[in-house]
Image (cartoon, rainbow, N blue to C red):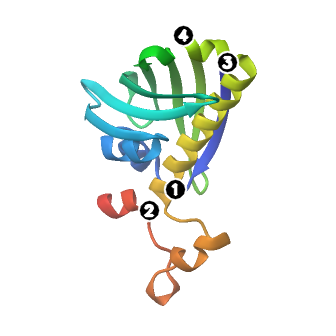
Amino acid sequence: MHMTDSRTIAASPEEVWNAILDPDVLKQCVPGCTEMSGSAEEGFEATVVQKVGPVKATFKGTVVLSDMVPGQSLTLTGEGKGGAAGFAKGGADVKLAAVEGGTELHYDVEAKVGGKLAQLGSRIIDGFAKKMADQFFSNFQSAVEGPQEGGDDASEAEGEGGEKKKGWFKKLVS
């Protein structure tokens, strides 16, 4: 399964870069992640609980960061084993570029599954993988930017005096 997309994040490339390397940010952003430990230099270990179609599994796996060009690009490579459910592995090439209003984050994702998961059929797997990637990058954008204006979060998006609140990651680095 292959997928490419991009999104503009209202933060500097340095802030986005630092967030990508932060295990706390990654834990918040990976859907179903219950544990995340490690470092960008040595790799991360994660536990993720997910339901794909009728198959629910706890995946234990690793994520390794490579080809790192600070503030510009990196490659994330991950592999998880879900016991009888099978395995999932894949990677994402991530590129950052400064644009007006923030940083454009471009990602190119490749994913493979095996075991019982592979028996579900490519339509279910492809849809699930796209949903997971979209959810991860949406969560990542929210963690860096903070709540978006409009919708139900509008009242929370503004602090005292009408100023826009920062994302929890921006609060840490500001």
Return the disc, 3 or 4, that comes first in the chain's sequence.
4
The CA distance from mark 1 to mark 4 is: 34 Å
Where disc 4 sits, the SS reads: helix
As shown in the figure, which amino acid type bears the numbered disc 1?
A: Ser
Name the residue tied to disc 1: 142
Q: Which residue is at a point 60% across and 75% down the rendered structure image?
A: 154
Q: Distance between the residues labelled 2 and 1?
A: 7 Å
User: Which corner quadrant holds the C terminus?
Assistant: bottom left
The residue indicated by pointer 3 is 120
Residue hosting label 4: 115
Residue 88 bears which disc, if any?
A: none
Q: What element carries label 1?
A: helix
Secondary structure beneath disc 2? Answer: loop
The foreground one among 63 and 80 is 80
- Horizontal side, residue 134 vs residue 173: left or right: right
Q: What element carries label 3?
A: helix
128 left or right of 165 in image: right
CA distance for labels 2 and 3: 37 Å
Mark 1 or mark 3: whose residue is earlier in sequence: 3
Q: Do the residues labelled 1 and 3 touch (CB within 8 Å)?
A: no
The type of residue carrying mark 3 is Leu
With respect to residue 54, does 11 lie above or below?
below
- Please identify, in this view, whether the residue under mark 4 or under mark 2 is nearer the observer: 4
Amino acid on which the number 4 mark rests in the picture:
Gly
Query: Where in the figure is residue 157, as x and y percent of width and height?
Result: 53, 74
Residue 50 appears at what percent x and percent y?
50, 34
Q: Which residue is drawn at 59% across and 65% down?
A: 148
Q: What residue type is labelled 2?
A: Gly
